[in-house]
Image (cartoon, helix red, strand yellow):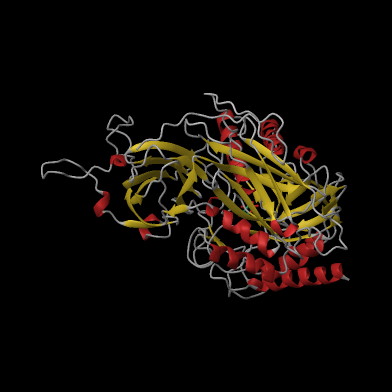
Amino acid sequence: MKIKLVSFAIICLACSPIGNTESLKKTEKEPHLSQAYSYIQNPDARPSLSLNGAWSYIIDPYENGYYNHRYQPYDQGYFQNKQMTSPSDLIEYDFSTAETLQVPGDWNTQAKELLFYEGTIWYHRNFQLNKQLNKRYVINFGAVNYAAIVYVNGKKVGRHEGGFTGFQFDISDYTNNGDNFITVKVDNRRERDQVPTVNTDWWNYGGITREVSILELPDSYIANYRLQLSKANQNQITTDIWIDGKLKSTSEKPALVQVSIPELGMKQNGYPDKNGKVNFTFKPNTDVKDENSLQQWSPKNPKLYSVELSYNGEVVNDKVGFRTIETKQDKILLNGKPIFLRGISIHEESPLTDGRAWSEADARILLGWAKELGANFVRLAHYPHNETMLKVADELGLLVWSEIPVYWTVMFDDEIVYNKAESQLVEMIRRDFNRVSVALWSVANETPNSESRLAFLTRLIAKAKTLDESRLFTAAMDTHSSSSNGVVIDDPLIEFVDVIGINHYCGWYYSVAEKCAEIVWENPYNKPVMISEFGAGALQGKHGDKDDRWTEEYQANAYKYNLQMLMNIPGIQGVSPWVLKDFRSPRRPLANIQDFWNRKGLLSETGIKKQAWWVLNDFYVNMAIKKDK
Ligand code: GCU
């Protein structure tokens, strides 16, 4: 039965956290939530139907399931899921007899013939939906790389571009009570005008690479919410909540929004305003002498608080930490105290299986290795990782550098490309701004200096600041210039970031390891510097002289002198060597050494430690001991 839905705006003029009941006016025009907040936060915390598992698939390199022979989109595409009803029917595709792929999962590592495949693959599965009255049904994709067109019961519900951020479509009006089917056109072709563009040093894993679920929500529901220590007053917790959805035409008693943080003995409620927004300010006890006072999150004490949000019969639970992160001259301050970020860079590749990481088990192993290394920080390169990775980082006490794949030579002078980058930035921030571990948002990696690049990146930073001012902004730059005896840190972007990220491969791409420690670094900026990448390649198990390329000894020697170099850099406040684990790359074909793996990992692709692991581990352990003295 279709529920007749009209929009309903809640006008609460004198609304206060306690919540006064104001006259409620219905208007036909329900203001749309800004794209930043019309995202259903924490989908895993909502009642849902998982669509993980085996999906049928059809490889479609000529997009024959989308275009007719005149290369025009046609309505008889594979998304119709046509079945033969008589022996004379001409239907040249059939999902019911097709092979299957596991979702989540990249296709490259699920079938030998798909390892290098770049193009379209159609995914298809059936599902049963037991629809309830007054409920909304929203499909949530953790990520699809690179472009997705989603059809439900043969009707297009939406499309998304960008391989590393979640997206959602309301499918309430597309689904039946009972039998349904979903078809997704996934296309991972690299294009010059995409983000990232055609050249990257990582594998172009295609597919539905993260989890898929159908969320069941009340007809008016908690969309996004954000809890964080106020930038203005670090003893206050600000809470913003965005309500979305439409109510039935009957005059409903307005529903109160309630937020509680039981461990802090705090609870407030109030009505959403005409834009569906409500915010509260909590003033927790911050008397450090009192054991019930607010404990600020840190790597040493990754304190998370259970938070309960409720509205219109829905309860959303989350675990949120509270901390401050800021810079003061050339220092990074966590909760007001200087911190050195002992990090490691990580690609989103599974340590358990081959291919893209997506599960909690993947996250616990990858981040468990970082903790074992002595790290308090991880650079999740070069794109937003899956949400579970950040929730585990919250729990383990690892600060995070999170980044969008504005990588190398994207088309900085193209407005459409800018919009693609901005969409991915917004999607990253609106998903993760409750993740206390995220300390830095990065807008780029190794982008060549130009006016259009500067305009592009500063515009992204300005946009990000409208969504979240509680974190630091950075980028990984390789555009430093050299002086007669060293390196001068200089890039026009530095004026716009809080922390200067520098990628520098002394002893691998240039110079020799022993000379790294002699480099004179000039940092004319009174800002913190991080070496966001240094490293060297080694094939695990290959041994020889420290000058023999690809031996573990060569890599360990490079680490030894780069770590000495590190401490000569004015304002150095952190490092995230490249990289935790060997990872697949189409740019690394050297037979019997690389075999399409980038060998700069401290661990082999199967997780075996190389000598350099111990060089970095010693450095971090000794640094941590010194710091604690
Ligand atoms: C670059 C780049 C990485 C790449 C690494 C390498 O700095 O940022 O994505 O993998 O160097 O050359 O191995």
Position of residue 184 measured from the top left corner of the image (x, y, whole percent):
38, 44
Would you place residue 157 above or below residue 313 in this image?
A: above
Of 276 and 528, nearer the camera is 276
Quarter of the image with the C terminus in it: bottom right
Q: Quadrant of residue 610?
A: bottom right
Count all numbered tags in the image, as a single digit: 0
Q: Which residue lies furthest to the top in this view?
A: 28
Position of residue 277 measured from the top left corner of the image (x, y, whole percent):
64, 36
Q: Can residue 446 be seen in this view?
A: no
Residue at image point 76% right, 44% down: 281
- On screen, residue 163 versus residue 487, left or right, reads left
Quarter of the image with the N terminus in it: top left
Q: In which quarter of the image is residue 105?
A: bottom left
Of 520 and 142, nearer the camera is 142
Of 624 and 234, nearer the camera is 234
Position of residue 32 measured from the top left corner of the image (x, y, whole percent):
56, 30
Q: Is residue 447 visible?
A: yes
Residue at image point 62% right, 55% down: 318
Residue at image point 85% right, 58% down: 568
- On screen, residue 357 versus residue 621, left or right, reads left
Would you place residue 451 above or below residue 218 in this image?
A: above
- On screen, residue 121 versus residue 517, left or right, reads left
Position of residue 26 measured from the top left corner of the image (x, y, whole percent):
55, 26
